[in-house]
Amino acid sequence: MKLYIHPGSPNARRARIVAHHVGIDVEEVLVDLPGGEGRQAPYRAIHPLGKVPALVDGPTTLFESSAIAAYLAQKAEDPIWPADAGEQAAVLQWLLFAQIHLDRPLGTLVFQALFRPEPDAAAVEAARSEAIPLLSVLESALDGRRWLVGDRLTLADLGVGACFTYAEPARFPLDDAPSVAAWLDRVNGLPALKHTRPQQ
Ligand SMILES: N[C@@H](CCC(=O)N[C@@H](CS)C(=O)NCC(=O)O)C(=O)O
C-alpha cells in the first residue's frame, strides 16, 4: 500500500497518523511538491488535483485525507471508526467541520507564520477572527470531556488533531479555549502523533 505524502503537510499527516495508530504498514512515497511534481501527469493520474495525500492500495486509489483515514481505520477494523451509526456520523461531522471550516483560517495562520518572510498583519487578524468562533465550537464540545465522540479516542480526535500540527509556531488563538488546549495535549501525547510530528 502506497501513501503519497509531503513530510510537512498536515493533511498528509492526518492519514499518516491513522496508519500508524491502527498499525497498517504503508510505504510512504514523497511527492516533490516544491519541485512541481504535483502538476505533472504521472502524479495527476493518482491525485487529480496534484495534492497530498493520496493512497493506492491494489485496485483502490483515494484522495482526500479524511477519506483515506476512514479507509485505513475501517480496513484495520479499529474501534477509532465506530460501528454505531450515531457515533460514526459524529466522527464524520468533526472531520468535515475540520476540513470545511477550521482548515481555512488555521491554514492561513500557518501560511503567514511559516511561509511568508513578512506576515501580512491584516490577513493574520482576519484569520484569527475567523478561527476564534470555530475554536469556541470545539471548546464547547470538549468542555468536561476528554474526547470528541463518546468517551474514548476516535478518528475524530486524530483527524481534527492533525489541523493543529503547527498550532504553536502559527500562534493559533487558543487562549480562550482551555479544554481544546488540554485535549490537544492528550492527542499530541499519542504515539502516532509523536511519530508523525514534522521537524519544526
Ligand atoms: N482537502 C485535502 C487538502 C489537501 C491539500 O491541500 N494538501 C496540501 C498539503 S497540506 C497540498 O498538497 N498542497 C499542494 C498544492 O496545493 O499544490 C485533503 O484533506 O487531502
Image (tube, rainbow, N blue to C red):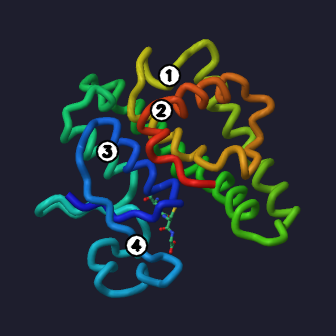
Question: Going from the N terminus, do you reach mark 1 or mark 4 first?
Answer: 4
| In this view, 126 is above or below 29 | above
Nearest to the eye among marks 1 and 3: give it.
3
Cα–Cα gap, marks 4 and 2: 26 Å
Q: Residue at x 31, y 43 (%)?
A: 70
Estimate the x, y position of residue 109 in percent, counting from the top left.
72, 56
Does the numbered disc 4 mark a residue whose Cβ is under 8 Å from ligand 1? yes
Q: Kindly identify which residue carries mark 3.
A: 19
Q: Kindly identify which residue carries mark 4.
A: 31
Left or right of 4: which side holds 198?
A: right
Q: Kindly identify which residue carries mark 1.
A: 147
Cα–Cα gap, marks 3 and 4: 18 Å
Query: In what quadrant of the picture does the C terminus appear?
Result: bottom right
Give the number of the disc on residue 75: none
Amino acid type, mark 4:
Val
Question: Going from the N terminus, do you reach mark 3 or mark 2 first?
Answer: 3
| In this view, 103 is above or below 90 | below
Cα–Cα gap, marks 1 and 4: 33 Å
Give the number of the disc on residue 157: 2
Q: Nearer the viewer, residue 94 or 24?
A: 24
